[in-house]
Amino acid sequence: MNNKMNFIDKIKNRETVIGPFSKTSDAGMVEAMGYAGFDFIIIDLEHGPNSILNAQNLIRAAQLSATFPIIRVAENEAVNIGQALDIGAGGVQVPQVTNAAEALKAVQSAKFYPQGMRGVCRFVRAAEYSNKDRFEYFREANDCVLILQLEGTEAVKNIDEILAVEGIDIVFLGPYDLSQALGVSGQINHPLVLDKMRDIIARCKVNDIATGVFTDNINDAKIWVNLGVNYISYSVDVGIIQEACKSIIAEVLAG
């Protein structure tokens, strides 16, 4: 699909991609955000109300509006990652990765042999319910995008060993976790945090891995882009809608 190639090509070329987390269960909302022009949308199964059953309709909506569908799985387990990819997610975002063993576990769960050992079933949506040639499916499936969330002080300490694991496409950093690890909790624009971000981005670049962060305001998003972050997870769909509604109300009542 065009949305798949556009997203993957942009990541490979280290262009900036922007998309929100999604906590809605409404496929129409996902579809509308796709038409708005977001590069991707992250269907959140870690901190959202959705199940793997209705997530597949959210994926259909994203694909219909040419937006790359990513699922943040609840945890780094083979069944969670495999199910997300089986229903057609173009990528998986795996939380709470703190060391190389956990990073390798995610790769193994997301990729078929020889890159990994993902469980095999071609009677799934991603394989057109067995309509797609099995060898074509296995080959294409290994193009899935793997995003690892490095969270907490242990992940920062183990950054080099994590980056040495083959098969990681994007390292997703939590600026608040990073600020805590550096002793300046909550100060995500502190020079220590920005310097560490530059260092991690440079290390990722050496290992041919893109970087990503979450932000919920335009100014910080611009800072991260200028620092070299490629994957900008901008806010959450329900929050974006609420802020837009507040802005409309305030503007109308201002006269």
Image: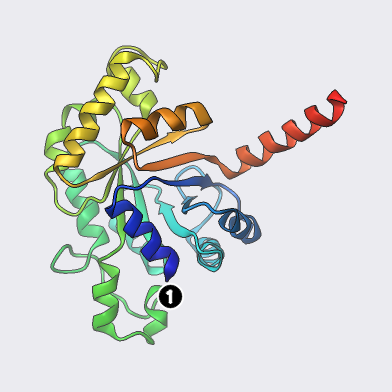
User: 70 or 190: nearer the eye?
Assistant: 190
Looking at the rendering, which quadrant does residue 214 occupy?
Answer: top left
Residue positioned 22% across, 31% down in the render: 200
| 31 relative position to 171: left or right | right
Residue 152 lies, in percent from the top left, at 29, 27
In the rendered image, the vertical position of residue 167 relative to residue 2, given as above or below: above
Find the residue positioned furthest to the top: 183
Residue positioned 22% across, 50% down in the render: 168
Quadrant assignment for the N terminus? bottom left
Residue 157 lies, in percent from the top left, at 17, 26
Residue 213 lies, in percent from the top left, at 38, 36
Q: Is residue 109 visible?
A: yes
The secondary element bearing badge 1 is classed as helix
Q: Is residue 154 visible?
A: no
Q: Residues within 10 Å of mark 1 (few under 14, many from 20)?
A: some
Looking at the rendering, which quadrant does residue 245 occupy?
Answer: top right
**Total residue callouts:** 1
User: 251 or 102: nearer the eye?
Assistant: 251
Colour option used: rainbow
Location of mark 1 (residue) = 125
Quadrant assignment for the C terminus? top right
In the rendered image, the vertical position of residue 84 relative to residue 240, given as above or below: below
| 98 relative position to 73: left or right | left
Residue positioned 24% across, 65% down in the render: 118
Residue 26 lies, in percent from the top left, at 64, 57
Q: What residue type is disc 1 on?
A: Arg
Residue positioned 38% across, 68% down in the render: 86
